[in-house]
Structures are given as structure tokens and as C-alpha cells.
Amino acid sequence: MRAAIDLLEFSYFQRALIAAILIGFTNGFFSGFVLLRRNALSLSALSHTMLPGIVVMVLLTGVLSQTNAFLGALLASLIVGLSSYLISKNSRIPQGTALTIFYTTAFAIGISLIPKLSIAQEMDGWLFGNILAVSNGDLWTFFLIAMVTLLSSTTFMRPLLITLFEPNVAAAQGVPVRWMNCLLYSQLILALVGSYQAVGSILSIGLLVAPAAIVSLFTNKTSLLFWGGGIIGALSSALAIFISVPFDLPTGPAIVIVLGLIFIISVIFSSRYGLGKLFSK
Amino acid sequence: MSEDCPSCDHSHHHKHALHVESISVRYHKNLALEDVSFDTQCGHAVALLGPNGAGKSTLLKTIAGLIPRSAGIVRWRNQPVKKWSREFAYLPQSEEVNWDFPITVRGMVEMGRYPQLGAFKKFSSHDEEVVDHALELMHMAELGHRQINELSGGQKQRAFLARAIAQEAHVMLLDEPFTGLDREHSAQLQQVIRQLTKDGRLIIASHHDLNTAEDIFDQAMLLKRNIHAFGATKDVLTNSQLDALYKS
């Protein structure tokens, strides 16, 4: 522990810590929506799909920036999402099957294109995350992403919640359900792009799913899913930084492992909604 | 039967009528509803009866504004309803609801206030009172802290009705509210519906059980793409009418 505290003097470590807290909170907050939408698996498809979009965008423009990444990710996920939808509508292939084929293909294209990039090294960080290398500029970007997603989701929290609970009831109350789904979708992509640098494209899903799932084992207060999820996301990301550096573990995976452990402990000990109820009777 | 609408200007009761005029609904090339017209007022409970696929759910959803109509107008209190009205509440079939949603009964009833509140208005003590009142009316005050899946089938229906009351809805559109309820819970829900219509609300519900329809609903509609009969339940549910509907 002593070693970890000494590390606080290094500016790279401070930056990593701030980044972890920002990204952890944003993604943890957002995991509330992922839980309520019950589509954690399609999120994994989305995350894999985004990679080739980013790579192609970098190939075309020669620059790796958050804006490029966001646009590339958005385009790729729209193409994959829409084409799998169209194919399932017009052929005998179920949508899940079409989606899986498309996203794995897209991910494969992304991986095969990475070596062609002049900034392959950096792209590697996007695949597996490299939070210890974030710059001050990156920090501002994380801050901006956090502000945009948190502000837009708290502003539209009520219509978003009604939509997630029961879209028909929402529409009958005048909620523009389609717009709310679009908003959720673009916020998800933004949150994912933001977390790429911390935990990488594959592990980012863990950060976007686990925190609210942990909270949901202990409460029925919907707002706690978001704020509680944010706090758990931030704390576990920070904790992972403190553990990973002295023990020389990769940071991105450490964040996901910490969350996974907290989840396992919670699911065992939650007396109401976890396995605990099996023993308490 | 009272025709008072809840929280309305009481001098205009007679205007609180629902006019459905020549509604048609198309799914792709199929005509799901054809030229459906009927009039009813606050204070009634209307049963929609008909075989599977007759368009009962479609009619409810169309009135709620969930499905675009290809022709026709819905008028409520003499005003055409463009798409949806805050005074209408739609209650989905039980199987369409995600009952695992981490929300308490009270939290769900509070959602009924969201349209009134918009995005920013604070949940006021008035809103709290409306929610309390709605829970009490539906005999759910004791169960407010429960997660919605910890309710029985009948209680779930009452929770949704409480939400509609909190929304200050006049017209409640219920999709198969009695499906899956045992005799005791059916009786409770029946009593609740009677109470709501007595308070001046208009209930329109799709219903399957011809034997109970007359006890619960004072008006009935026989529907099979278009209206075969509509009127007082005892006049509509005659053997010849039913034969014509179910055997044709």
C-alpha cells in the first residue's frame, strides 16, 4: 500500500487515477440503462463492431482523435445493426445470428487492418486499454464525455425511464419513444468510446454492465442504480489502479476483475435478490 | 350512474364523451380494423369481445395513439385527439411488462406523474398526495414499498390502475386485465373497475370471458375487424349475436 501511495507523486499516476474515476463514474452511471434495457449481450456486439469503424476512420483521415473514433464507431455500428435487422426481416436467418456473424466479421476486419496503420501502437491501446498513458488532453475529453452523457441522461431521465419500463405505456403518455432510443444508443456509443482507452474495446463492456447489476442486488430504488452504479464504477476503477501498478498488472483488466469480484461477492451475499435468498429460508 | 369526470369542471359532464369515428387500421396490406365507429361517455365500463385476432388490442392501442390509423378520427370531449392525450392511459397485457424492473410499486405509480412534471419540475407535495390517493383508491397503500414482481396478478393490475389514476387519466384502456387472475382476484378487480366508473372514469377493456362480461361491464362491443354489435351488455350478449360473431 505504501508503494501505491508513493505513486501519487507521479503525474502519470495522478492522470490515470482521474481518468479512472471519470470513466468509471460515467460508465457506471450508464450501466443503469444497460441493465434496464436488458441488452447486455447486444452491447458486446456493439463494442466489437465499433473497432473496425475506428480503424477505417483512422486509415482515411490519418488521425486518431475522440471525434474520429466516435464517428467511425457510430457509422460501423449503424451499418452492422441495420444490415442484421434487414437480413433477419427478409430471410430465414434470426437477427441474433445475423448480428453475431456481422460483428465478428467486422471485428476481424478491424484486427487485420490494425497493422496497416502507422499508429498501430496506439491502436493496440484502444484494443486492450492503456490508462497509464493518458495525456492532459485525453483527460479533458473524458471530462467532456462525462458531462455530455451525464447531463443529457439526467435531463431526459424521466422519459428515458418510462420508455425503458414499458415503451407502449410511454408512447401513450406522449413520450417520443424512438428519439429516446436514439439518445440512449448514441450515449452508449459515446460512453464506450470513452472507456476504450481505459479498459479497451473488449473489456469496456464489463465496466458498462457490472456496476448497476451490483447495485440492483440491493435496492429497488431506480435512481440508485445510476448514482450507485457511478460510485461503484469510480471506486472500483480507482482501486484497480492502486492495485495494478505496484503488482505490475495490466490496468484495464484489473478494473474488470475488481468489478467481477465485487459482483460475485454481492450475488452471494445479497439476501433478497441474489443467491443469499437460497440460504436465508 | 355518475358522469362526473375526476378533476374536471363539473358543469361540462355531458361533454365528456368519446367519439370514435370510422377508424380503419392497416398492418401492411391487412385491414386489422375497418370503419369502426362508436360513442360512449365517462362513467361506463366497456368490454371489447371477439375471437383472437379480431382487433381488440389494435382498437385499444389505436385509441391510445400507439398505432397510426389509416382513416378515422378519435374525439374526446369534442376535441379531435391528434395522436395521444394525457387523459388517456393505456395498460399493457401483463406478459408485455418487464416485472423484474428494479422499481417499487410506489415508484411505478410516481411514473404516472412524469407527463405532468416534464423533465425538470420537482416532485411536489401535491404529487405525493396524488400518488398516495391513487394507491389508497386501489387498496395498494400497504404494498407501496414492494418490488413490482412481489405482487400477485390482481395486485399488478391494480398497481397499473393506480399509476393511471396518478396520471389523472379519464379514459383507461386495459388489454386483457382479467387474464390469469383467479376467482378471488377477479372479484377484487371487478370491484375496483366498478368503483372507477362510479367515480366518473371511462374504462375500455378487452375481455375473453363471456360469462363474466355482464357482471363487470355495462357496455359491450362485439368486434371482428368491424363492429358486429355495440350497446348495453345484456342486449349485446345474446345467443344470436354471439353465434354470428364466433361461428362466421
Image (tube, coloured by chain):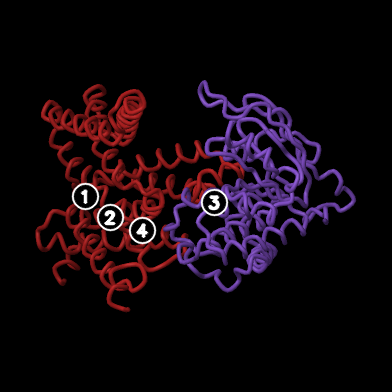
Chain colours: A red, B purple
Which chain letter goes with mark 4?
A: A
**Compared with residue B20, is residue A157 higher up or lower down, i.e. above or below?**
below
Q: Nearer the viewer, mark 3 or mark 1?
A: 3
Q: Which residue is mark 4?
A: A212
Cα separation, mark 1 vs mark 4, equals: 23 Å
Q: Which residue is mark 2?
A: A20
Q: Amino acid at mark 2?
A: Ala
Which chain letter goes with mark 1?
A: A
Local crowd size for mark 3, using a 10 Å CA cut-off: few (<14), some (14–19), many (≥20): many
Q: Nearer the viewer, mark 1 or mark 4?
A: 4
Left-right relation of B221 to B96: right
Q: Which residue is mark 1?
A: A131
Residue A68 visible to the viewer: no
Relative depth, front residue between B155 and B122:
B155
* Label at residue A158: 3
**Compared with residue A115, is residue A236 higher up or lower down, i.e. above or below?**
below
Local crowd size for mark 1, using a 10 Å CA cut-off: few (<14), some (14–19), many (≥20): many
Q: Amino acid at mark 4?
A: Ala
State the quadrant of the N terminus of chain A.
bottom left
Cα separation, mark 4 vs mark 3, equals: 18 Å
Q: Nearer the viewer, mark 4 or mark 2?
A: 4
Residue A193 found in image quarter: top left
Q: Are marks 4 and 3 in contact (CB under 8 Å)?
A: no
